[in-house]
Amino acid sequence: MSLANDLSPYVTAAVSAYGGAVLARANEEAADTTVGWGRKLLQRIFGVTAAEEELPEVVAELVAEPKNADLQAVLRVHIGKLLKADPVLAAQVRAMCEQADAATGRSGSTTVIASGSRAVAAGRDITAPVSTGDNSPIDPT
């Protein structure tokens, strides 16, 4: 998974919580750790601004529609390009993301547990039919 994908939950939470003030300098503590880390990550990537300054277009678009998955992807791609172009920034953001993961309890691994008779567990996408019953009509060939 790319670094931009790793930090995406943080930055989208911060944009949703702070809106247009997401890059503005502020001393208040975020009520939610994820939101706080998202804001710190965005400020590190795009810089800290005065409240009246314009946001970068890619951030402003997501502020206008924070639940829009396409705009979240656009921001993620843009951040990925910025990080690829600046290895020092990428290393700083990676370290921050690791701190954020530790502070929020997120980790890079996924634990999947299947429990019960004929239970199915998948750690990622299932790309083929899954049957847990006898005499399945699924053709295994």
Image (tube, rainbow, N blue to C red):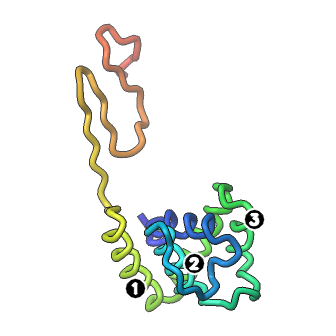
Q: Which residue is mark 3?
A: 64
Q: For numbered disc 3, what is the local secondary structure?
A: helix
The span from disc 2 to disc 1 (Cα, nearest Å) is 14 Å
The span from disc 1 to disc 3 (Cα, nearest Å) is 30 Å
Q: Residue furthest top?
A: 135
**Is 41 rendered above or below residue 125?**
below
Of badges 2 and 1, the one in the foreground is: 1
Q: Which residue is mark 1?
A: 91
Q: Of callouts 1 and 3, which one flags the residue occurring earlier in the amino acid sequence?
A: 3
Q: Position of residue 120 (x, y in %)?
A: 30, 30
For image coordinates 67% across by 57% down, the residue present is 70
Q: For numbered disc 1, what is the local secondary structure?
A: helix
Looking at the rendered structure, the kind of residue marked 2 is Lys
For image coordinates 40% across by 80% down, the residue present is 96
Q: For numbered disc 2, what is the local secondary structure?
A: helix
For image coordinates 34% across by 76% down, the residue present is 99
- Quadrant housing residue 106: bottom left
Label 1: how many residues lie within 10 Å, few (<14), some (14-19) or many (20+)?
few
Disc sitting over residue 81 in the figure: 2
**Is 109 rendered above or below residue 134?**
below
Q: Of callouts 2 and 1, which one flags the residue occurring earlier in the amino acid sequence?
A: 2
Question: Is residue 67 or residue 17 the one in the foreground?
Answer: 17
Disc sitting over residue 71 in the figure: none
Q: Is residue 3 left or right of residue 112?
A: right
Of badges 2 and 3, the one in the foreground is: 3
Looking at the rendered structure, the kind of residue marked 1 is Ala
Q: Position of residue 23 (x, y in %)?
A: 62, 82
Count of numbered badges drawn on the protein: 3
Q: Of callouts 2 and 3, which one flags the residue occurring earlier in the amino acid sequence?
A: 3
